[in-house]
Amino acid sequence: MSAALAVDNQNFEEEVIKSPIPVLVDFWAPWCGPCKAIAPSVDALAEEMAGQLKVVKVNTDEAGEIAGRFGVMSIPTLLVIKGGEVVETLVGNQSKQAIAAKVQTHLA
């Protein structure tokens, strides 16, 4: 079970846009190999940064409208959203350290 919260069209606004803390949004799909490769790093960050950072996953097959809204053209794509605005974008397979370094700059 993933430490990240699955979000969709019904709860995206509440869980991500209105979040009082920064949110790491992982856009993925079940058939995506690089998405599966990055998942353990995303899950580890969800656990390690709990309370400072919310981590959510958006299945692009099921919530393509959200991906379109943010211009996601390839997956995996990670967005850091703070105060309802995208403040960081990472595309492709990234190391846990690279993701953490990008996220750290946006934590309070």
Image: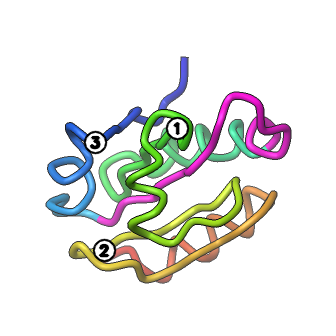
Left or right relative to 55: residue 94: right
Of labels 3 and 1, earlier in sequence is: 3
**Label 2 neighbour load within 10 Å: few <14, some 14-19, many 20+:** many
What is the magenta range? 22-37
Q: Mark 3 belongs to which amino acid?
A: Asn
State whether residue 97 is above or below residue 47: below
Comparing labels 3 and 2, the label whose residue is closer to the camera: 3
- 74 to the left or right of 85: right
Q: Amino acid at mark 1?
A: Asn
- Mark 1 element type: strand
Residue 78 lies left or right of residue 40; in this view the side is left
For the residues labelled 3 and 2, say whether their Cβ atoms are less than 8 Å apart. Answer: no
Residue corresponding to mark 2: 82
Dot 3, crowdedness within 10 Å: few (<14), some or many (≥20)?
A: few
Q: Position of residue 89 (x, y in %)?
A: 57, 76
Tell me the residue that label 3 is attached to.
Answer: 9
What residue is rendered at 47% in x and 55% in y?
Answer: 25
Q: Which mark is drawn over residue 59?
A: 1
Query: Secondary structure under badge 2?
Result: strand
